[in-house]
Image (cartoon, rainbow, N blue to C red):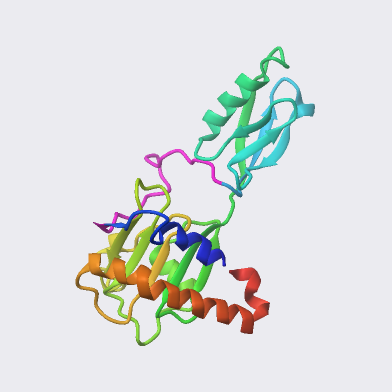
Amino acid sequence: MALAGAVMLMAPGCSPRPTVRAAPPVVETAGTGAAAYRLRPGDAVWIDFLTDASMSLEVPVTPAGTITLPLAGDLKAVEKTTEELAADIREHMSPYLIDPAVSVVVKELGARPVFVIGEVRSPGRVASTEPLTVTRAIAAVGGLLPTAQPRSIMILRSEGVAEPTAYKVDLTLVLSGKDLTHDVELVPNDVVYVSQSLIGDVGEFVSLFFESILPAQLFYLRGYDIVNPERRGLW
């Protein structure tokens, strides 16, 4: 059902048909040019009140994207940098502290779920606190089946984009070392679909995906969950 919740964000009647685009480049997550990290639900942050250590505490970012502080109450944290969150805390705590100097540090990263379905050995949910690329996500579900077509792997994305978007990647270019940009870095709630055959008309595939492929995959995963209750915690 976790898979259903994620992918149904893009289902007909809930949002527009996905836009089809070329695969984005691999995102650099380290180095001096890396963008500042933005908080996500499931993260935990340490809030250090520099002038009153007794008020310092660790708080989680809730599924609603907020943190809760004594006196200040609920503050939005999701999609903010630690510096931006610290500024908000200073503003909201200024009525209660003479000097609300504060620093915020990420203590723990929450799991980032993605979903891999289609011609893979154990289709389902993959959650990791580390960045996941297409190859890592596929490896986490046991790899490709012999029936898989690695030249036509689709990524369907609803988070962090103006409208649901589909990307097509060619994994053979990654495996051969010819073009590592096709090993796209995934974002939370991405759906990676591994097809049996080459996908020519991507727009036509997107329509087929939501009308036929997705319902069949959800039916399969629901049945697997019933037959294998010991794996429910993974999905």
Q: Say whether residue 34 is magenta.
A: yes
Q: Residue at x 52, y 66 (%)?
A: 3
Residue 84: x %, y % from top left: 52, 29
Residue 60: where, in percent of width, then height? 66, 43
Q: Is residue 61 left or right of residue 213?
A: right
Give the residue furthest to the left.
200
Residue 84 position (above or below residue 129) = above
Establish if 139 lies above or below 73: below
- The reply, left or right, for residue 123 in relation to residue 50 is left
Name of the residue lying farthest toward the right: 54
> Where 108 falls versus 88 (above or below)?
below
Residue 217: x %, y % from top left = 45, 76
Name the residue nearer the viewer: 82 or 192.
Answer: 192
Q: Is residue 35 visible?
A: yes
Quarter holding the C terminus is bottom right
Q: Quadrant of the N terminus?
A: bottom right
Q: Is residue 174 visible?
A: no
Spot the residue most to the bottom.
Answer: 146
Describe residue 155's horizontal placement relative to residue 225 as left or right.
Answer: left
Q: Position of residue 124 (x, y in %)?
A: 51, 72
Q: Point out the stretch of residues depicted in magenta.
A: 20-40
Tell whether 198 sits left or right of 101.
left
Asked if 211 appears above or below 129 in the picture, the reply is below
Residue closest to the eye, 234 or 176: 234
Label count reads 0
Q: Residue at x 79, y 28 (%)?
A: 54
Residue 56 lies in the magenta stretch: no
User: Residue 117 sits in which quadrant?
Assistant: bottom left
- Seen from the viewer's position, the closer of residues 66 and 172 is 66
**Furthest-front residue in view?**
13
Dividing the picture into quarters, in which one does residue 11 lie?
Answer: bottom left
Q: Main secondary structure of the magenta part?
A: loop
